[in-house]
Image: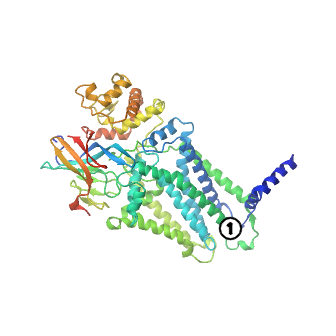
Amino acid sequence: MRAHWNRINDWLDHRTGVHTAVRKFLYEDIPASSGWHQVFGSVALFLFLVQSFSGALLAFNYAPTPGDAYNSLRYILTELTGGRLMRGLHHWGASLMITVVVLHMIQVFLFGAYKKPREATWMVGVVLLLLTLAYGLTGYLLPWDNRAYWGTVVATNIASQAPLLGPYLSRLLGGQGSIGVVTFARFFGLHVLLLPPATAFLIAVHVYLVRKHGVAPAPGDELVPKKKFYPEQVFKDTMAIFAAFAILFVMAVAARVPLEQLADPTDTSYVPRPEWYFLFLFQLLKLFTGPLEVVGSVVLPGLAVLALILVPFIDRGQMVRVTRRTFAFSFVALAAIGWTGLTAAAVITTPKEASQVAVDYSAPTDWMELSSEELAGVGHFRQENCVSCHAVGDTGSKIGPDLTRTTIHRNAAWMIQHFKSPAGIRPGSAMPPIQLSDSQLNSLAAFLLKLNPQNATALSTPRISRFRARWSTKRMAATHAIKSMVWVWTWVRL
Amino acid sequence: MAQIPIGTPVEMTFRRMRVDGWKVVSEQNSAWVVKSPNNQITAFGPQCTHLGCAYHWDEAKNEFVCPCHNSLFSIEGKVLGGPAPRPLDQYETKVQGATLLLGRLQTPPEQSA
């Protein structure tokens, strides 16, 4: 049996060379000083694979258009088996990946492992860091909730400030005027079509360069016999990967991934905040005002990236022991203090309300039992601001009847007719017609038929309270006459 | 018109048609409407001219406040503080009887930075 197996192996190796390649990979010589501090690269690669896998599973159930993205994500979270786990892995995996990539860079920086002949390896690594951040930026919009929408409004406005390139960048990102289908399609395209192959290619180049030049030795390593990558370093890498996955899994299961209200361009009470790793940049903009604004938004970050890329050419000295690299340690400590200070200031100055708008989509139980069509109705219910005139249990305005009263529900056909022509069905009604398609009205009616005093509590978010506090006599207006292809005159009855 | 208080901005929502890429969408939007003592109506675009965050009216301070980077605007839309590079954008307005017509959103030419 063993001889048979060996023959198959030999045949495969002769045709593909796979065993020879694996053997060469595992039994590569590495410096005697190699150890736990060099596990971050392997963990980052593992997390990239986790992101690719969880992203692909999400994409199987996600509709990448502004009209459907939010509801498809709610479907993933509430109805799909393992959907919440997949989104948790993908969301927290992004944060963990950025953390690990930065730790990897800090380790290489502190040890001076970027020095000749490893300059190209370092520079490819910096580009990989930028790509990792680009995933965070482009993926932020995809849930199409308020957090995503307003965060992207700010990001595209910052991009538009870039000297010379600003208007072109803004146009490329589709952010001119307002965020809509074009921006969404481009962010989605970048996130799932362009960035992954670019990352995979650069990881391959990075690993090739690491193998070509070998793991950077510490001074004095040449006097000690080298060791093999397998088994000692492979074991350490594997343990670190297990630890990272354990942390990620616990976060995906235990920590709720934020999903806020459906993106609402009219929600003027929303306070946008970027993801935690961009908070320091957001805060930095408060320090540069007027003509200096572009310094904080574009020039300083651009110079920082340029300096990072040129590190191997700035520091061209001989390799010294890590314990003697005082300047490198001081630089990292200063950067860490600066980052922490700016991030903490951004967190402290965030109004409390901004962190309270997450929807608790897991409760109550009735809420979980809504079909996908009824959930779509929730989106239309929020989009149309029904609570600006109607009461919903104890919340909302009191101008129109309480929508949780089952006596006003009748049946779907009657409700749809009523939505289309309120005054026609109920003479004297001041309610404006709802301008949605038949299928959208169908979803809205399906949801309202399920709405009752018990499950209405799930709608009692701070958002609805804010609506109640707003001017209650607001009226949504209908289109009046087309002024141009882009804008129309609209009327607001006063 | 009588429902809008003089000297206190009111946030109003309306529906507009907009070309969004390959389709025309009917979407909600909002404006901060101000009625002056001589019944002049001004309607401001709802986004801060700094980075596009939504601002709100602070009754205690009597000014518009952007929560992102603390830009401050007067009731006339002029920049009072913070990083905003120009005054609030304004909709073209036209009053027909009891109806307010809102048109294109533009930067007030006389206040442009």
Give the color scheme: rainbow, by chain, secondary structure or one colour: rainbow
- Chain letter of mark 1 equals A
Q: Residue at x 33, y 31 (%)?
A: A394
* A315 displayed left or right of A492: right
The residue where tag 1 is placed is: A212
The picture places residue B57, in percent across and down from the top left corner, at 26, 49
In the rendered structure, which amino acid carries the disc numbered 1? Lys
Choose between A487 and A268: the one closer to the eye.
A487
Q: Identify the image quadrant of residue A409.
A: top left
In the displayed structure, A317 sits above or below A383; it is below
Q: Residue at x 50, y 57 (%)?
A: A134
* A432 displayed left or right of A355: left
Q: Is residue A251 visible from the viewing direction of this image? A: no
Choose between A222 and A381: the one closer to the eye.
A381
In the displayed structure, A485 sits above or below A103; it is above
The picture places residue A193, in percent across and down from the top left corner, at 53, 52
In the displayed structure, A20 sits above or below A415; it is below
Q: Residue at x 37, y 50 (%)?
A: A271
The picture places residue A291, in percent across and down from the top left corner, at 33, 67
Choose between A457 and A296: the one closer to the eye.
A296
In the displayed structure, A360 sits above or below A169; it is above
* A149 displayed left or right of B77: right
